[in-house]
């Protein structure tokens, strides 16, 4: 991973045009080519990013990242404060807490709990930005990506939206829709999920453990 702290301006063109005026920011380049630009605030969400696959061209004062979609991110470097590269090695992946992992296992065994006719294709289905908890198919054969959380929040919605974007690039799976499921879901996450076309489903954990084929102890928020 390469980490560059620099005073820079950033211009993006593609789905829209965006400009970040001159300021000190962190530029992160991961081993797979994904590039993200962070400020010192805004929690963990980058100000702008380009996921792999892409092409990065660098010079002393300018970086240009482009991809096959026609998107282009230009970083103009006014001052490089620090530039370091670290090999992080293999990562064992996210180890989920017991409740979240157990929820995923139970829903993999009983996907119809979320929606009548839903069937499991695979747990931990891989994408180039991480695995989707459950990949399913609905009664009409449409692919459904399911993200399982103990508590659903805005980050969970954003994470699922990114997975759907990557899965939609595979013509064998597209179009893909999403379900965010958790024991509780924050009101802000429900609003964002609706805006992104994602269904939010709250699960009764105890009811799920006891559920039989005809028993549904959950409620859905659309």
Image (tube, helix red, strand yellow):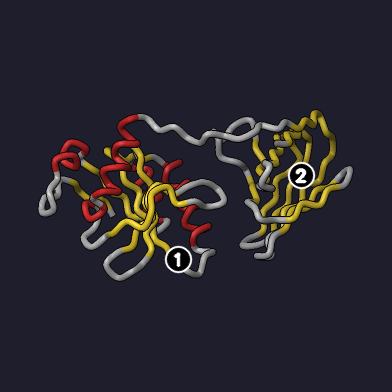
Disc number for residue 144 = none
> For numbered disc 2, what is the local secondary structure?
strand
> For numbered disc 1, what is the local secondary structure?
loop
Q: Residues within 10 Å of mark 1 (few under 14, many from 20)?
A: some
Of 201 and 135, nearer the camera is 135
Percent from the top left, x then y, of residue 199? 33, 54
Mark 1–mark 2 distance (CA, rounded to whole Å): 38 Å
Tell how many labels: 2
In the image, residue 51 sits, relative to residue 149, either above or below, namely: below
Q: Report which quarter residue 214 is drawn in.
A: bottom left
- Is residue 169 toward the left or the right of residue 10 in the image? left
Of 21 and 62, nearer the camera is 62
- Is residue 162 toward the left or the right of residue 15 in the image? left
Q: Earlier in the sequence, mark 1 or mark 2?
A: 2
Read off the residue under disc 2.
9
Percent from the top left, x then y, of residue 79? 84, 35
In the image, residue 82 sits, relative to residue 144, either above or below, namely: above
In the image, residue 188 sits, relative to residue 11, either above or below, namely: above
Check the image and name the residue furthest to the left.
214
Residue 194 seen in the current view: no
Q: Which image quadrant: the C terminus?
A: bottom left
Q: Nearer the viewer, mark 1 or mark 2?
A: 1
Percent from the top left, x then y, of residue 2? 73, 36
Read off the residue under disc 1.
173
Residue 143 seen in the current view: yes
């Amino acid at each position: 991973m390469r980490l560059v702290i620099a005073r820079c301006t950033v211009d993006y063109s593609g789905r829209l045009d965006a400009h970040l005026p001159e300021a000190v920011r962190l530029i992160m380049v991961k081993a797979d080519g994904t590039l993200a630009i962070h400020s010192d605030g805004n929690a963990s969400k980058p100000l702008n990013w380009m996921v792999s696959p892409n092409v990065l061209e660098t010079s002393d004062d300018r970086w240009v990242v482009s991809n096959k979609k026609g998107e282009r991110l230009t970083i103009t470097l006014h001052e490089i404060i620090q530039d370091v590269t670290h090999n992080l090695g293999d990562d064992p992946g996210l180890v989920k807490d017991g409740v979240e992992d157990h929820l995923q296992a139970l829903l993999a065994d009983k996907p119809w709990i979320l929606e009548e006719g839903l069937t499991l294709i695979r747990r931990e289905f891989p994408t180039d930005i991480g695995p989707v908890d459950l990949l399913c198919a609905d009664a009409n054969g449409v692919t459904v990506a399911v993200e399982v959380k103990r508590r659903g929040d805005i980050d969970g919605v954003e994470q699922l939206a990114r997975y759907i974007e990557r899965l939609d690039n595979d013509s064998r799976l597209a179009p893909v829709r999403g379900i965010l499921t958790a024991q509780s879901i924050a009101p802000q996450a429900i609003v964002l999920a609706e805006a992104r076309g994602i269904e939010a489903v709250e699960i009764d954990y105890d009811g799920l453990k006891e559920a039989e084929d005809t028993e549904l102890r959950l409620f859905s928020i659309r």
